[in-house]
Amino acid sequence: MATFFGEILPVISRAVDDDDDDESFENLETYVKIKWKKEAQEEMELTKDKKLQVNAFVLAVGPAATGFTQTYVTHKNYEIIGAMFCGMKEDDVNTFGQMSPTDKTCYIYRKCDYPSALVCECNYDIRPEYAHSFVNQLMSCLNLCEGHVVIFGSTFTSEYKSDVPTSDMNPPFMRALKTASFLGTPMAPYLEQPNVATGLPAQMLTYCHIHKLNAVLYMCYTDSIHLDFATLKTFQPLIESTPVKYMREENKKASETLKKIVDLHTKHSTLYM
Amino acid sequence: QGRIHQIEYAMEAVKQGSATVGLKSKSHAILVALKRASSELAAHQKKIIPIDDHIGVSIAGLTADARLLSNFMRSECLNSRYAYDSPLPVSRLVSAVGNKSQIPTQRYGRRPFGVGLLVAGYDDQGPHIYQTCPSANYYDCKAMAIGARSQSARTYVEKHLDKFLECSLDELIKHGLRALRETLPQEVELTTKNCSLGIVGKDMEFTIYDDDDVQKYLAMIEGEERSRAAPPADQAAMDTQEGEGQQPADPQPADPAVEEQGMEH
């Protein structure tokens, strides 16, 4: 750059960062790791195809979905048989026991009296790049031929495109997508065009569709950035969905559990009053 | 389309704050506010902020922006008392806030204030309730509710609007608490922990009631039947039972290549 007085100055371009970007993307395939309990691994060894026989599988992604499954499904009579690890970020807060609903964890639960029913509660924010590896690693250990899969997820109404203003839609509301093999009718209206499901829930549904599994995805559109009661309650009718109705555990203290989960999530955020 | 999105986004921030309701009668103006659960380790963040003896505000949205605006309002009131030896009329204060809020909606490098205020005040003209917006608009209201799920509170207040003018203070407070309760789900109740009350009136300086002080007002509406909220339009669709062996009702794309494609919609 020539200045008024004729001297030449070096120009700093904002297009190129001189310091190296520290965040180099981890290897896509090995970033996500799955670990099974010893007993589960031994069971897998005993089968012909080295997979667990699963008839009912629930994948809950995000705090709203996992809050729902923790309250109505896995709170009792379930044991952890595996976990998936996707690295912790700087600002992730975890308790030592890793059992708080706000912890960034992904555990795989099995029903004690119905061993072919599995629930995977994923509280990580799985980036879309890692979703493929996540689903592949998880599903390569499960034999789901005759089984039912249901996926619960949530996202913001700001992602929802329609000609009706979102405030007229009474958020939070539920939408569903299903695979061709699933012949029933989901318990929520189909997700209208041009909306698309994205991320881990979509990856799982795609896997199920390609492998001709019966699967339904339920996506809750919420207008609240914090987890709130209304969002959790939108999931409630889905305890009657297949296969959740065979896997649920009656929870007399459901309201208190839901309240506790909501409080746990709201305590961390002080930005908005 | 001619929309200024930053302002609209800022108005969305107000909807992320918890609900608050403002009502006025012939003699008093009140604010009731829902407090979010907070950590036991830290002191409660205030939702209703005193501005002067005759004015108070309740906030919804970004806490820090609210603090800034309320500091500004306090200094305006102080300056007026010093210069004119009389309380600042509420309308003037609110228009000063409006003018201040407009600047960052038009200046390079700045963003609108992400907070909405409900201003309750009493001056020579009587009691007032004003609403301010990140858009720098302000509204003189008979009654108003802002924040998350405040539509239900607004509906309640619209229904009972003609009663407020002649109300006694206690009745007015009961209406305010009922309106606030409308924003809560059926399972959650108003308690001394989640509720705040502010009152200003003819012979009453702006006073805030928190925690145990709210109990006597909550007792007045205890046991009252809550109106059942109308189920969302989706509920009817949600009740469809899953049937086995039914063909999906959605239209099938005519293209035979659909088998290779991903999801059916």
Image (cartoon, coloured by chain):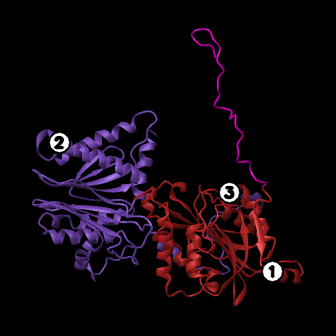
Chain colours: A red, B purple
Label the magenta part by its dominant secondary structure. Answer: loop
Instruction: Tell me the tag on residue B80.
Output: 2
Quick check: do tags 1 and 3 share a chain?
Answer: yes
Discs 2, 1 touching: Cβ within 8 Å? no
Tag 3 or tag 1, which sits nearer the N-term?
1
Nearer to the camera, B42 or A118: B42
Q: Give the CA distance from mark 2 to mark 1.
A: 75 Å
Q: Amino acid at mark 2?
A: Ser
Chain ID at mark 3: A
Disc 1 crowd, CA 10 A, few/some/many (<14, 14-19, 20+) = few
Tell me the quarter of the picture where residue B143 sits: bottom left
Measure how far apart labels 3 and 2 are at the Cα level: 55 Å
Question: Which residue is at the front of the view, B136 or A174?
Answer: B136
The reply to the same-chain question for discs 3 and 2 is: no
Number of other residues with Cα within 10 Å of mark 2, as a class: few under 14, some 14 to 19, many 20 or more: some
Q: Position of residue B144 (x, y in %)?
A: 27, 59
Residue at 40%, 49% (x, y): give it.
Answer: B114
* Element assignment for label 3: loop
Quarter placement of the C terminus of chain B:
bottom right
Q: Amino acid at mark 3?
A: Arg
Q: Farthest residue to the right: give it.
A: A48
Q: Position of residue B156 (x, y in %)?
A: 28, 68
Name the side, left or right, on which A131 lies relative to A91.
right
Q: Which residues are magenta?
A: A1-27
* Image position, residue A141 (x, y; %): 81, 74
> Is disc 2 placed on a helix, strand or loop?
helix
Residue under circle 1?
A: A38
Q: Nearer the viewer, mark 1 or mark 3?
A: 1
Q: Is B244 located above or below residue B93 in the figure?
A: below
